[in-house]
């Protein structure tokens, strides 16, 4: 059975002043999702949390869809797996260029600090 909640949304916006995503539905109801509480229940890294926050700023409806469907943890897990894979690839690239492992890992961490 299809979940029709997302089809009935009139407006969706992140209110950074109070930390809620506010959702208005066609029937006049309003839903407020406290982002801090949703995110506290997740296993995240700095990168996956930054990705969630970019969603809040740019596509809050996608954040709401994942929060309502229970798919947010899977999203974070996929993001974190991609970063782990990329981290290893970057480290290997620095090792091939002659850097020692400690320096290669430090440089890879620095790369990701700019990505967040």
Image (tube, rainbow, N blue to C red):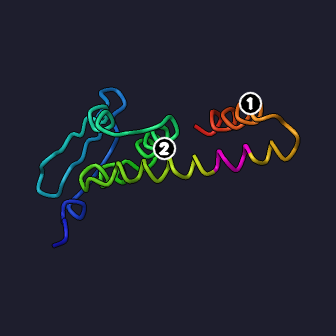
- 25 sits to left or right of 111: left
Residue position for label 1: 102
Q: How many marks?
A: 2
What residue sits 18% from the left and 44% below the top? Answer: 31
Farthest residue, direction right: 98
The boundaries of the magenta stretch are 86-91
Percent x, y of residue 83: 57, 47
| Quadrant of the snapshot with the N terminus | bottom left
Q: Which residue is mark 2?
A: 51
Mark 1 is surrounded, within 10 Å at the Cα level, by few (under 14), some (14 to 19) or many (20 or more) other residues, namely: few
Q: Residue at x 61, y 51 (%)?
A: 85
Q: Which x, y percent locates residue 42?
A: 33, 40
Tag 1's secondary structure? Answer: helix
Is 49 part of what is drawn in magenta?
Answer: no
Q: Dot 2 lies on which element?
A: helix
Observer-nearest residue: 56 or 9? 56
Alpha-carbon span between mark 2 and mark 1: 27 Å
**Farthest front residue?**
101
Between circles 2 and 1, the one closer to the viewer is: 1
Query: In the image, is residue 43 above or below residue 7?
Result: above
Q: Residues within 10 Å of mark 2 (few under 14, many from 20)?
A: some
Q: In this view of the protein, which residue sits in the foreground, 21 or 66?
A: 66
Precedes in sequence: disc 2 or disc 1: 2
Q: Which mark is residue 5?
A: none
Tell me what residue is drawn at x 84 percent, y 36 percent. Answer: 99
- Characterize the magenta stretch by its predominant secondary structure: helix
Quick one: quadrant of the C terminus?
Answer: top right
Q: Look at the numbered discs 2 and 1 and tell me whether their residues touch, using CB distance below 8 Å.
A: no
Extreme residue toward the bottom, this view: 1
Residue at 33% over, 37% down:
39
């Amino acid at each position: 059975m299809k979940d029709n909640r997302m089809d009935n949304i009139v407006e969706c916006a992140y209110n950074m002043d109070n930390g809620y995503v506010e959702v208005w539905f066609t029937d006049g109801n309003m839903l407020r999702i406290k982002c801090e509480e949703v995110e506290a229940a997740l296993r995240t890294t700095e990168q996956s949390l930054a990705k969630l926050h970019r969603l809040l700023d740019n596509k809050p409806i996608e954040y709401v869809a994942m929060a309502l469907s229970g798919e947010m943890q899977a999203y974070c897990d996929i993001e974190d797996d991609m970063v782990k894979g990329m981290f290893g690839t970057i480290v290997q690239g620095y090792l091939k260029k002659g850097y020692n492992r400690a320096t290669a890992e430090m440089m890879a961490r620095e790369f990701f600090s700019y990505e967040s």
